Image (cartoon, rainbow, N blue to C red):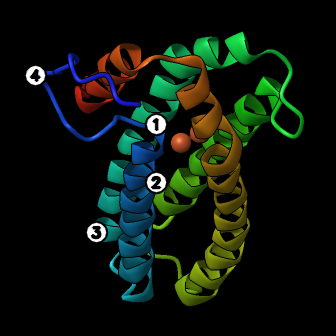
Amino acid sequence: MKNASSHHPVSTAAPSFLSLLDVHARLNEIFLLHQEALLMQDIHLARERLLQFERELLAHMMFEEERLFPIYERAGRIPGGPLELFAGEHRKMRLFLDRFKQRLDGWIPPPPDLKRQIIALFDEQAMFKHLVEHHDLREQNILYPTLDRVTDERERQQLLHLKGRSRS
Ligand SMILES: [Fe+2]
Ligand SMILES: [Fe+2]
């Protein structure tokens, strides 16, 4: 039975960490825009979009590492979702990003075999996208639902409010 006396002034929709899936979707979109620029061989645009992707991905991962991981530990040992796994995937993503940036930096001025090099980069980026896909799925199925379970509505609201404030 519902508690009729509880009236929250803030929001009627129950906050959930699953709302962070919107961030994942936005990141995927920016990465695709980066790849579209690569297809057009517009290296400057591709670089600009990669840097935007990096900024937003790093902000998201930092939010997860600093704010969410400590809370996730409250749940104890979760099968299929040890904290080191999430942290390790973040580390791998950062390494991929550094390599992508190095490649693009080497394309100013464009080398004669630029098209071949772009194909090689796409191959590498396919591995990255695979890693991200698995990581996001694990967060969707394990990390975020567990965080919903070990927090109350007030704490969820506070934390999810924080992620909106990006320190550029
Ligand atoms: Fe993550
Ligand atoms: Fe995430």
Q: Nearer the viewer, mark 4 or mark 3?
A: 4
Give the SS element for disc 3: helix
Q: Amino acid at mark 4?
A: Pro
Residue at image point 71% right, 66% down: 130
Q: Amino acid at mark 3?
A: Leu
Spatial distance from mark 4 to mark 3, Cα to Cα?
44 Å
Give residue 17's position: percent from left, percent from top: 46, 36
| Quarter holding residue 92 | top right
Task: Check contact, mark 2 vs mark 4: CB within 8 A.
Answer: no
Give the SS element for disc 2: helix
Ligand 1 found in image quarter:
top right
Which disc number belongs to residue 17?
Answer: 1
Q: Say whether residue 100 is left or right of residue 51.
A: right
Crowdedness of circle 2 by 10 Å Cα count: few (<14), some, many (20+)? Answer: some
| Quarter holding residue 115 | bottom right
Give the SS element for disc 1: helix
Q: Which residue is mark 3?
A: 45
Q: Amino acid at mark 2?
A: His
Q: Which residue is mark 2?
A: 24
Give the SS element for disc 4: loop
Q: Name the residue nearer the viewer: 83 or 101.
A: 83
Spatial distance from mark 2 to mark 1, Cα to Cα?
12 Å
